Image (cartoon, rainbow, N blue to C red):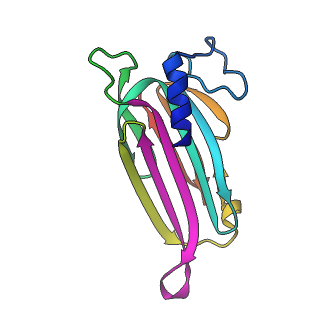
Amino acid sequence: MGWALCLCAVTAAGCRPPAGRAPASGTIALPPDGQVRLLARKVEGTGEAVHWVWAVVGERNWGAASWDGRTLRLSRATPLSSPGGPRGTHIWEIDYSARRRAGPGGGVATEEDASVRGTNAVTASVSFAGPDRTGRMSARFEAAVTGDTLLRLPARTDLARLDGKAIAIDIER
């Protein structure tokens, strides 16, 4: 969780961009009130595999993460300054990969893995496997969220699509 340490330091310093404005390029900060920041990073994109990581940075904590099919849900939101201490974390990392592998009977299969981990060590993961469609993996994959993106809470958006099937995130307010 490379971003987590940087984000924790920024959070401790109390850095927030002015309301309605994204931070200066290269700056990682808490999002404005009522929003969540998604930071995307491509790890790999070849004919045989794709691998992306998204960091979720909130202006509030979420205490639970779960997968409902192909949708990640962050829930049990509490303010960052909750009385009695935090009941979750405001920083989550989503790791998604898809690859082509030898399948049963000598065919080719597509395997997908998606996991989420909070800086509070809460984790959830899901895997999918199915027959492979023809074509390079990188041509069949499309990242829907790239770079630094701000979303209003509650938020629901597709992170990526493979063969028309979305990996999505649903974040409660």
Can I make out residue 41 in this image? yes
Q: Give the range drawn in magenta.
A: 89-118
Please give the name of the residue rendered at 68% of the width and 59% of the height, measured from the top-left corner.
45
Q: Which residue is drawn at 66% across and 61% down?
A: 140
Image height of 92 relative to 79, above or below:
below
Q: Is 104 covered by the magenta stretch?
A: yes
Residue 24: x and y in percent read 71, 22
The foreground one among 93 and 106 is: 93
Q: How many labels does the image show?
A: 0
Q: Which of 139 and 100 is in front in this view?
A: 100
* Rendered view: 132 above or below 26: below
137 relative position to 121: left or right: right
Residue 22 as seen in the image, left or right of residue 61: right
Would residue 125 be found to the left or right of residue 4 on screen?
left
Residue 15 vertical placement versus 9 (above, below): above
Whole-percent x, y for residue 154 in the image: 46, 27
Measured as percent of width and height from the top left, residue 160 is found at 59, 49
Q: Can residue 144 be seen in this view?
A: no
User: What secondary structure characterizes most of the magenta part?
Assistant: strand
Q: Position of residue 7 (x, y in %)?
A: 54, 29
* Residue 6 drawn in magenta: no
Residue lying farthest to the bottom in this orientation? 105
Q: Is 126 located above or below residue 149 in the figure?
A: below
Q: In this view, does 122 lie to the left or right of 72?
A: left
Instruction: State which quadrant residue 110 falls in.
Output: bottom right
Q: Which residue is drawn at 40% across and 26% down?
A: 61
